[in-house]
Every structure is written in C-alpha cells, then in structure tokens.
C-alpha cells in the first residue's frame, strides 16, 4: 500500500474538519452526560431531527440550513426542556435506577427515527447552499467548503458555550450542579431548574449539529445510529465535562476515521469510533483529560 | 495478643488531593475503637480502603494475619471484615428476611464447615432480625422502615456475615437520643459476643461511652491514638476537632 | 413449586401447545409463531441480565446476529442439523458475552450499556466486511431437501424454537429461585452493598452476560434457514434490541412471566400490525409502548396485576 504524503495530508486535514463537526455533535452529550449524568442516547436522533428541519425549510423556502438551525434554536431548547421535565418527573425524583432512564431514551431514539421514516421516507435527503460544492485549494490540500463552513461555525459555537458556562451566572450554576448537587441546594438555587436549562441547551445544540450534518452528507433517518458510538466515544475519551478534552477527542477521532476511510475504505468507519470507545472504557475510562 | 487488624502506612490520593497520608493503626481482637475527626478528614475513605471498596496506593492492610491488599470487597467480607454504610443501602426489592439471607448465602454458606440448609437459613434470618428488634417486619420491604430501623437492618446485615471485625460507619447520624442508645446497646451486645468494633461517629457522647480506645483523624493523618480520656485532653485534638 | 415439577409442567404445556398448533389452518400460523417464540427467547434471555441483574444490554443484535452468522459460516463448510448449529452458536455467543463482560462490567451500568451498543456496531462492521459470509450483499441459504421430521420445514423450525423457548423459561425460573438469583437481585438493588455482603459481583455479572448472550445466540442460529436470505442490515436490525427491551419492560422485569407476557403481547401485536398496516408504523407502536410503559407502569403488566391484587386484598 502506497502511502503518499499528499494522500496522508489530505486525509489528516479532512479529519480535522470532520473533527470540528464531531465536536458540534458531541457538545450536547458533553453537557447532558458529562455534566448532568443523564445518559441521553437519543441525542443523535435529535440531531437527525435538526437535519430534517433544515432540509424541510431549505427545500420549501430555500433558506440557508445554518440560518434555519439558528432560528430553530429556541424550538429545540423548549423541546429539550420538555423532555427533561418528563425525565425529572418520572425518574430523578423517584430515585429510580438508571435502567429505566436508559430504556426511556432508547425508546425516544426509536420513536424519533421511525417517526421520521413515516413522514419523510427512507430516501436520502440533502440541502442546497452556495457553499456546498466549491472547494478551496490551499497548497497541496483540498478544503471543501461544505466541510469548512460547519467546522468554523462549530468552533464558534463551542467557544461561545464555553464562555457562557464560565462567565454567566446560570452557566456557572450549571457547572456547580454538575459537581455538587448538595452544595447547590444549600445555596438555595433549584437544581431541577438549572438542569432543565442545561438539558435544553444540550438539545438546542442538536439543531445546529443537524444542520452541519446535512450540509456535510445526505441524511436518512437511521444515520443517527452511527453517531451514538461516535458521540459517546468522544465524550468518554475526552473526559466527562471537559470541553477542551472533548474537542481534542473529536479532532482525534476525525483524523483516525479519515485516515481509516482513505486507506482501508469507508465501510470500516463506524467500527473506528466504537472500537476506540470500547478500548477507552476497558483501559482508561477517565479519558484523556478526565475529571 | 496478635493484632486483628494491622494498617501500615496507608495512603490514598484522588488526583492531586491526598485523602489519607501514612495511616498506621493496629486493632486487637475484642477492642472497641472509636474513630473520630472533622468532616473531610478521611474517615470514610479509610473505611473504604480497609474494606476494599477503594484501592489504597501505598501501605498495606493485614487482617487476621492475612494480607488484604488487592482483594475485592466481597472476599474481605468473607474473611471476616464487615461494614455498615453511612447512608443505609438496603436491598429494596426484597423483604427484610431476604436482605439478611444474601450475606448468609454468600459468606456463611461459602466458608468451609458452616453451610446452612434452607430451613436453618430461615431460622438464622429470623434470629438476626430478632436481635435488632425487627422480627415482626421480617416479610416487609425496606421502604416501610423508619430511619433507625434501616440503620438496624444495616447492622443486622453486616452481622449476618459473622464477622470478626465490624466497622460501623456513622450508624447513628440523625438519630434521636434514645435511638442512639438503642444502637449503642446493640453494638455492645455484639462486642460481648466477641466481635471487634470500630465505631466511626460524630456524636461524642456515644463515642466516649462506647470506646475503650480513641483514634483521631485530621486532614488524612492520624494525630492521636489512645485512651479516650487522654485523647480528648490532647491539645492538638482539642484544637482541631473538639474546640469548634 | 419445585424445580422439577415446573420443568415437567412447562414441557407438558409446550407439548400440548404444539399438538394444538398442528391443527392450524395454514402455514402462516407457524411462520408468525416462530417469530413470537423467538422473541420469547430473546426477551427472557435479555431479562436475565437486564431485569434480574440490572444491566441494560443494547447490543442484543451482536449476540443474535452472531448466532445467525455462525450458522451461515458453517453452512458454507458443511450442512449441520439445526440443534447442533444452535449449540455452536450458543458457545460462540457465550464466549463473546464473556469477553465483552470482562472488558466492560467493571464500569458503571450506563457505560456498560453504551459499550454493548458499541459491540453491536463493531460486530456488524466486521461481518459486513467479511466476504466469506456474503458481506453487505448478504447470503443465501438453501433449506435441506429432507425435513428431519413432520415433513414441513417451517413446522420443524417452529418446533425447535418452541423447545428453545421452554428451555429458556425453565432456566430463567431456576435462576430466580436459586442462590444465583438472589445474588443477581442484590446486584440490581445495590451493587456496592452486595459486594460488601460477600456477593462476588463481577463473577455473577459475567455469568449473567455469558448466559444471556449464549441464549440469544441460540435464538439466532435458525434464522438464516427461516429467512433463506440474510444480510447484515436485517440481521443486526435495531428492532431486535428494541423488542428485547420493550417486551420485558412491558411484561414485567422481575420474574420469568414478564418477558413471556410481553413477548406474547407485543409479538402478536406486531405480527398483526405488519400485515394490516405498514411495518414502520408497527415499529413506532413498539417505541411508543416502550416509552409509555417506562413512564407509567415501570413494573410492567405483571406489576399492574400485582398492584391490583394487593388493592383487592386490602393493605397488609
């Protein structure tokens, strides 16, 4: 197998861009699982929902997908808050085991996926936008705009969220809740409300991540399943609750997947993330920069 | 008399934080040891390291002449070290009798020469529940119990394993005056039967009346170890703990 | 009721059921019945690890499809009778269950569940890239010309799955009443307390994973002969996982009756729905029922019945 430098470099760059997108996909889980300890395995389904929302608006009104996603942010936020209310009322207050919570989200994942199949069918859908198609040439390296734009917006989103969490009152309350619920109760802030806000934010990110997804590749309802593994692999590898760790892990995964796809073929890509996840869980569960 | 429990130079870190630093402790059979210290001094961490729930990084633990390091918690229990939890952890889906049955099945029935037949098991469950005053509620579930009853169940369950050493981790927190006396009486009965007891507690009068030896932990270090009356007069102890 | 008596009754019920089934008007009954029986096995097997021990396995497909694909692999080598295939599939899936458990059972329950999902995808990717068993194009299986008994191949498969269902239920019930069952329940209720009470939690969890995986693999072994064409997408379908979780949850997770009731209830609904309405809508129903029961009746149908009985008797 010839390993040309050109090919390797392209693969790495593509991997970095892919990694940026993966960061957007995982940041929601970083919040819900990393900080709130809620195993929302339905998160990828919300991302697909976001992708279809962008598709629908784009094909009906011709609106740019990222713009659509930004407009849809409050809708997804409310959706997340609503889901959290149900989760809180049914599970956390009863002190029930994680088992039912897991089954709940799993059922949700399934319902969303099947619902999308019923409404949109199983054909692949895609969006139209001026930056899907053109490619920058940067020396030896190709930078497809359809990867570059999501990458850029994703980085902006991650930075903004990090600032929000560290600078605003509610953001810091969220960080506090993730570390010590008792302390928060003593401070007489209501952890339930804080968690609801955080979960709402986590689902809101799915709106944007969904737009990125459908810009990067055509989408059909079951695509979300490939992302369950990726998302949790990144969150676990990066260490729960650590944004810089998560971004690092996302970039790493992107690069490894890209190289695998380039040299071994794309049919091995799904296994990469899950394989990394299994290895991480088996040997170093606290991740790269764990708490 | 050889020590039942020998802790040598035990150390435990959580990341950069040192929870326990060079703990040395020897407990003789039959002793009633009180372990006290301010919040965060490492008492629970010590219990967890002794029982195998946590792994200590440095130092070693010998129990009954055997090295405990590396052994999982269930094996330590089988060898005779039992503990009760600070926040009671009952098996909620089972009756009280079945809660007691679990340690019987998995410790007593596993040791050589002490296998109990099913009828004997039932009898032993009732016996233990009777000892802690919960016999009438044998068929009930833990959710029907009051706070102090749950503490008693916790102790009964620890005792079902027929331990040589019982570590009672804050078994009396939040209980009323007479409830504390209840638990103390129970622990005394156990001690009279030959069980060595380490009592971890904040309630000073309980510790003082029960212990014939007092150990003080502050910020992960042992700062005092001796007769209760002397330890409580130790200026370091007074400064760090009692003089709040 | 003692163990021996239960086995006797179970076998008797199975035999009577089979005898009555032979009077069915058409072949479709056996085709649908096979699927329901298969789900009884999957649901009961899942429940050993999920309901009894408290560890949620999302990677049902990994074990089930592994069983199916071991049959495919062996088909190319030499035709073997289905019971033998089942045994081999059981061993293969059991070993995989053991390995997976060893890697992941030291982690918290949530991590274990995610790892099971990871396993399923890794396995699917491996099989998709394995040309010997057909890869993504799938494999065709020809049913043997001579049917071992009964003259009708579908009836034969139905009988085999019925026997496996009886065995699985018998195993589940035996576990419930045994020391192992108590151990599992203690792990489910409070693993730390169980460990402190002398229960070797890791070992028991490995037993549960291995047994559960092996039974699921055995349920998958006849699948290629049932469908005659198998590809990874259908073998590893997520609907197996959803059903295996929904059925015990809806039926009741704490004993052997729950998965049976759940499988009969949900399995029958699905068979009817697939015929009368679309199969996608049928899956939606499963998802909605799963979430509905999780939220409203977490102890399943068995739990609802128990509560009604308690209320009728008046509080103790």
Image (spheres, grey):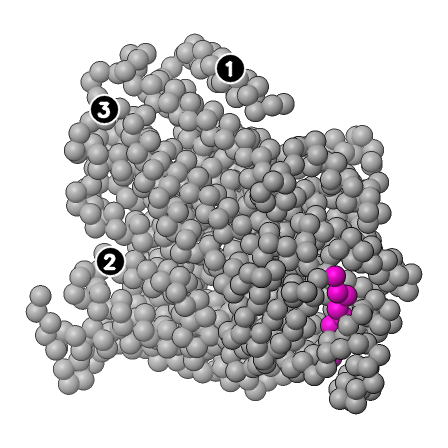
Q: Which residues are magenta?
A: B30-38
Residue C12 marker: 1
Q: How many marks?
A: 3
Label 2: how many residues lie within 10 Å, few (<14), some (14-19) or many (20+)? some
- Residue at the spot of label 2: A268
Chain of the residue that carries numbered disc 1 in the rendered image: C
Along the viewing direction, whichever of C70 and A18 lies nearer the viewer: C70
Residue B180 marker: none
Q: Is residue C5 above or below residue A127?
A: above
Label 3: how many residues lie within 10 Å, few (<14), some (14-19) or many (20+)? some
Residue B85 falls inside the magenta stretch: no
Front: mark 1 or 3 = 1
Residue B31 falls inside the magenta stretch: yes
Chain of the residue that carries numbered disc 3 in the rendered image: C
Chain of the residue that carries numbered disc 2 in the rendered image: A
Along the viewing direction, whichever of A45 and C315 lies nearer the viewer: C315
**Residue at screen point 40% across, 56% down:** C103
Q: CA distance from mark 3 to mark 2?
A: 32 Å
What is the x, y in percent for residue C127?
Answer: 25, 47
- Residue at the spot of label 3: C143
Q: Are marks 2 and 1 on the same chain?
A: no
**Residue at screen point 23% across, 56% down:** A267
What is the x, y in percent for residue B102?
Answer: 64, 44
Among the 4 quarters of the image, the one containing residue A208: bottom left
């Amino acid at each position: 197998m010839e390993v040309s430098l050109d090919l390797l470099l392209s693969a790495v760059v593509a991997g970095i861009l892919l990694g940026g997108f993966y960061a957007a996909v995982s940041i929601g889980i970083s919040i819900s699982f990393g900080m709130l300890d809620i195993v929302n395995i339905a998160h990828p389904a919300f991302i697909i929902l976001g992708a279809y929302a962008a598709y629908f608006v784009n094909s009906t009104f011709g609106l740019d997908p990222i713009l659509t996603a930004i407009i849809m942010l409050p809708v997804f936020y409310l959706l997340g808050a609503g889901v959290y209310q149900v989760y809180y009322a049914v599970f956390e207050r009863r002190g029930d085991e994680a088992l039912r919570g897991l089954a709940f989200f799993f059922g949700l994942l399934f319902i969303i996926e099947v619902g999308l199949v019923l409404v949109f069918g199983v054909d692949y859908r895609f969006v139209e936008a001026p930056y899907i198609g053109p490619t920058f040439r940067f020396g030896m390296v190709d930078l497809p705009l359809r990867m570059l734009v999501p990458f850029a917006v994703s980085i902006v989103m991650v930075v903004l969220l990090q600032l929000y969490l560290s600078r605003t009152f509610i953001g810091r309350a969220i960080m506090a809740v993730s570390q010590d619920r008792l302390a928060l109760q003593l401070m007489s802030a209501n952890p339930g409300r804080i968690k609801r806000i955080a979960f709402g934010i986590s689902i809101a990110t799915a709106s944007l991540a969904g737009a990125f997804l459908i810009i990067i590749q055509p989408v059909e309802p079951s695509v979300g399943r490939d992302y369950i593994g990726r998302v949790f692999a990144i969150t676990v590898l990066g260490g729960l609750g650590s944004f810089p760790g998560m971004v690092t892990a996302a970039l790493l995964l992107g690069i490894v997947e890209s190289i695998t796809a380039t040299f071994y073929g794309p049919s091995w890509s799904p296994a990469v993330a899950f394989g990394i996840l299994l290895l991480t869980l088996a040997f170093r569960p606290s991740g790269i920069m764990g708490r | 008399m050889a020590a039942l429990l020998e802790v040598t130079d035990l150390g435990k870190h959580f990341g950069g934080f040192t929870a326990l630093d060079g703990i040395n402790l020897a407990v003789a059979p039959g002793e009633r040891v009180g372990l006290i210290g301010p919040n965060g001094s490492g008492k629970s961490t010590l219990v967890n390291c002794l029982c195998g729930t946590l792994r200590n990084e440095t130092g070693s633990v010998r129990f009954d002449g055997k090295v405990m390091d590396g052994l999982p918690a269930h094996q330590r229990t089988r060898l005779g070290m039992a503990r009760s939890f600070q926040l009671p952890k009952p098996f909620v889906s089972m009756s009280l009798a079945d809660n007691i049955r679990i340690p019987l099945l998995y410790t007593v029935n596993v040791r050589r020469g002490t296998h109990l037949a099913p009828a004997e098991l039932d009898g032993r469950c009732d016996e233990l529940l009777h000892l802690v005053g919960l016999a009438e509620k044998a068929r009930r579930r833990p959710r029907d119990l009051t706070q102090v009853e749950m503490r008693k169940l916790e102790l009964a369950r620890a005792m079902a394993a027929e331990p040589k050493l019982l570590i009672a981790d804050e078994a009396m927190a939040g209980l009323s005056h007479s409830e504390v006396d209840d638990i103390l009486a129970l622990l005394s009965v156990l001690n009279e039967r030959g069980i060595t007891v380490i009592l971890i507690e904040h309630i000073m009068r309980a510790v003082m009346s029960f212990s014939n030896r007092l150990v003080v932990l502050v910020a992960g270090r042992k700062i005092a170890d001796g007769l209760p009356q002397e330890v409580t007069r130790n200026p370091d102890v007074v400064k760090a703990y009692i003089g709040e | 009721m003692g163990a021996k008596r239960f086995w006797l009754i179970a076998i008797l019920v199975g035999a009577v059921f089979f005898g009555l089934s032979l009077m069915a008007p058409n072949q479709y009954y056996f085709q649908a019945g096979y699927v329901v029986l298969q789900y009884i096995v999957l649901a009961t097997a899942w429940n050993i690890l999920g309901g009894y021990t408290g560890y949620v396995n999302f990677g049902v497909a990994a074990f089930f499809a592994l069983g199916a694909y071991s049959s495919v692999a062996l088909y190319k080598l030499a035709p073997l009778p289905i019971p033998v295939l089942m045994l081999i599939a059981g061993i293969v899936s059991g070993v995989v269950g053991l390995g997976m458990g060893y890697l992941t059972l030291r982690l918290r329950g949530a991590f274990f569940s995610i790892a099971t999902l990871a396993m399923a995808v890794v396995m699917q990717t491996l099989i998709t890239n394995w040309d010997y068993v057909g890869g993504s194009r799938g494999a065709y299986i020809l049913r043997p010309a001579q049917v071992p008994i009964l003259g009708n191949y579908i009836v034969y498969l139905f009988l085999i799955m019925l026997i496996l269902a009886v065995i699985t239920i018998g195993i589940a019930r035996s576990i419930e009443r045994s020391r192992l069952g108590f151990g599992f329940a203690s792990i489910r209720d409070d693993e730390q307390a169980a460990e402190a009470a002398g229960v070797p939690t890791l070992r028991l969890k490995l037993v549960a994973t291995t047994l559960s995986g092996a039974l699921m693999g055995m349920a998958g072994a006849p699948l290629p002969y049932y469908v005659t064409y198998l590809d990874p997408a259908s073998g590893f379908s997520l609907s197996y996982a959803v059903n295996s979780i929904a059925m015990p949850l809806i039926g009741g997770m704490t004993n052997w009756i729950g998965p049976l009731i759940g499988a009969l209830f949900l399995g029958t609904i699905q068979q009817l729905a697939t015929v009368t309405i679309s199969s996608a809508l049928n899956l939606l129903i499963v998802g909605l029922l799963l979430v509905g029961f999780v939220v409203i009746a977490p102890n399943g149908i068995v739990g609802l019945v128990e509560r009604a009985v308690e209320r009728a008797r008046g509080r103790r």
